[in-house]
Every structure is written in structure tokens, then in C-alpha cells.
Amino acid sequence: MNPAIQGLITIVIGVGGCIGYFYFSNQILDRVLFPATGPNAGRNINRANQIRPWLFLFPALVALGLYLAYPVFETLRLSLTDRSQDGAFVGFANYSQMFGEGKFWEALRNNLLWLIVVPAASTAFGLLAAQLTDRIAWGSVAKSLIFMPMAISFVGASVIFKLIYDTRPVESSQIGVLNAVWLQFDGGIGSFLFLRLLPAIMLIGFAGLVAYVGYILCRPLWNATYRAGTIVMKALRLVAGLTAIYFVGLSLMNVVDVFTMSLPYGEPQTWLTLPFYNNFFLMVVLIWIQTGFAMVILSAALRGIPEETVEAAIIDGANPFQVFFSIKVPQIMGTIVVVWTTITLVVLKIFDIVFAMTNGQWETQVLANYMFDKLFRANDWGVGSASAIIIMLLVSPILIWNVYNARKEMR
């Protein structure tokens, strides 16, 4: 059968089935089970109205149970069994094996690196684009161009950037944009500015941003003016502070490396095989895609800021930077956090980009790709399911926090 006809039939059956379910279930409820006639008409109407919401929710609850709840419990069960022993219960042996593998810790480390860099960069670039495009006449066109990558699949974007990072032999013409630019450097002032000074400034800026975020999170621990929260919250703040210190130190050490390393000028580089740095080349793909999403949400938030507060700040003598950072950003901080956490959820589940560009080689492994390798390449459902549970545990606190904040705002 032609795929187009098959798709059309699927749509007709799906939509028709939904309409038929809601129509006939209402008819059975109102005419057969609780008819609005006779001496009990009032009681029947009330009972029908109490049951009707659950009747409408029933298909969604079944779908959630079948496609969400059941896979979670089944994955948990599989993580406690061993395929080589005909599915025998082995307890936490799979988790112990997973924690003993270097590839798992490599994946966890890389996921942590993605979590720090991608949400921060995407949100920052999105906020910058939202602010700047609102101030130019052709802002709508600019927003459309920035948002366009959101329409591209992760695999499609990976193919595009794989061509950008492509490497050909020295005597051949470079079709990869990055290598074509790289070969223009020869160690002069341009090489110093673009390959040493600019990366150093970016690393120092990143270290400053991480340090500031760490300071904001840990400030309640020593300042009585702010509430530090429960013991669990204090522990999380402390962990966040220690993580910030680690990445600040790592960034500053890389600043030293940038100025001391010997760069192979005139030789095309296989960018995706350079350990540590290749992770950032992969992150660029997701940042390019998610910046458009952040821009659209934050642009709407900026437009919702009352003009009176901005005008009052200008009258008081605030410059554009003070207006933006001291007036606008605090008023949309809730939206910034929502965008940040939404991108964080995407990062925790990242798979397509790594699979399509490096397949986890050259120290670029991430948790989702590690899970895929165990499940479908090594046929080890125990360790693969255990890694899936780890991903779920990492995602769950952010989901719960988002739901909690959404309900708090509704109240």
C-alpha cells in the first residue's frame, strides 16, 4: 500500500475512533447507565457528571499506563535480572558492573559537562537574540532565521555539522568550513587573537558565569538574610557549589593550556577525534538548535515587562546595560529558569547527535548512547536497563521541580 494512503487511513481511523469513543460512551452513560428520566433523574444526572471526566480521561490514562508506567516498571525489573542466566534475578549486580566500567563514568562526566554548557549557552544566546531582535526593524525576519534550526531533526543537524567539521588530506581542497578557515592561520597576530586570546576570554567568561551561579546558589548557606531551606536543599546547594569550584578550576587550567599548547598550523584537523574538545564541537549542534527555542520564549517574556518600570529606570539615569540586567532580567527570571530546565531535560536525554557524529568514540560517550550500546550492540539488557534507570533518576528531580513551580505559580 502507498505510504501516503496508509498514513491517511491511519489518521481517519485514529480521529474517527476518538470521535466514536466519546460519542458512544456519552450515549451509554446518559441513556443506559444513568438516564435523566424517572424519579431518580436528578441523582442520575449528578452521577453521570461525576463519571464523565473519568470517562474522557480513560484513553489518556490507558495510554500513559501502557507507554509510560509499564515500560518504567519493566525496565526496573530487567535491570535486576541477567539475560545470560535466562532472566534470573541478580539484584544490583548489573548496577555494580555498570559502576565498575570506565565508559559509564566517561558518559556521566560528559553528560555533566553538557548539562553545564548547553543550557547556559542556549539560554544566554536566546536571551541576547530576543533582546537585540526586538530593537531592529527586521527583527521578525531575524527571529525566523534563528528559529529555523528548530525545524531540523537532530540527525539532520548532525549531518550538517559533520560536513562543517569534515577533514580531507592536505593536498585536497577542504570542503569542511572549519578546516578551510583553520588552514588560513599561520601563527601570526590573527592566530594569536582567534586561537589563543578569544578562547581564553571565553573560558574566563565561562568560569565567571559558573562562579556567579555557584555563589548565588550557595549564598544562603552563610548569609542569614536568605533562607537556605531544608537539610536536603542545603546539601544540594553545597554539591552545586563544589561542582562550580571544580569547573571554575578546570576552565582556568584550560586557559593556561590555550596559551602554552603547540598548534599544528597548516595541517587539517580531525576535529571530532580531539579528546575533551570534541565534546564542545558536539555541543555546538544542540546550542544551535535550542537557541531559537530559548529566543521565542524569552522574547515573549521581555514583551510582557511593564513599560513603566523601564521608563522609571531610564528617568533615574540607568544606562541600557543596567536596564537590561537590573530591571528586565529579574522580572523574567522565572521564564529564564523554565527555559533553562527545559533545555536541561533535552540534554539529559541527548543521543542522536552523539550517535550520528561520533557514536561515543574518542571520549564522547553519553548516558543515552551508552544505554543503546549495551541494549542493542552488546545485547546486555541488564546493564542497559540499569543505565536507563539512572537517566530516569537524573531527569525526575527536574520534572518534579518544574511541576512544583508550575503549581505554585497557578496558586
Image: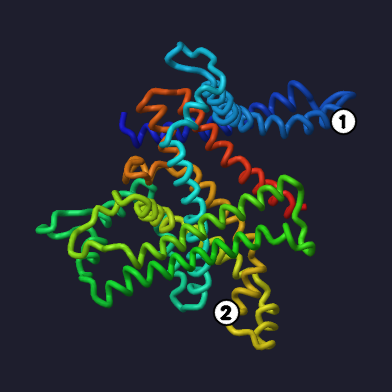
**x then y, percent, for residue 16:** 53, 32
Rendered-image quadrant of the N terminus:
top left
Please tell me which residue lies in front, 147 or 272: 272
The image's colouring method is rainbow
Few, some or many residues within 10 Å of mark 2 (<14, 14–19, 20+): few
The residue tagged 2 is 321
Q: Which is nearer the N-term, disc 1 or disc 2?
A: 1
> Taking 71 as reference, is 25 left or right?
right
Residue 300: numbered disc: none
Task: Name the residue rendered at 65%, 29% in the picture.
Answer: 58
Label 1 secondary element: helix
Of circles 1 and 2, which is in front? 2
User: In front here: 243 or 70?
Assistant: 243
Q: Secondary structure at mark 2?
A: helix
Of the pair 367 and 253, the residue shown nearer to us: 253
- For residue 313, say whether it is visible: yes
In space, the residues marked 1 and 2 are separated at their CA atoms by 65 Å
Please say whether residue 20 is visible from this viewpoint.
no
Residue named by callout 1: 42
Coordinates of residue 290 in the picture (x, y in percent)? 46, 56
Query: Which amino acid, mark 1?
Result: Gly
Say which of 22 and 96 sits in front.
96
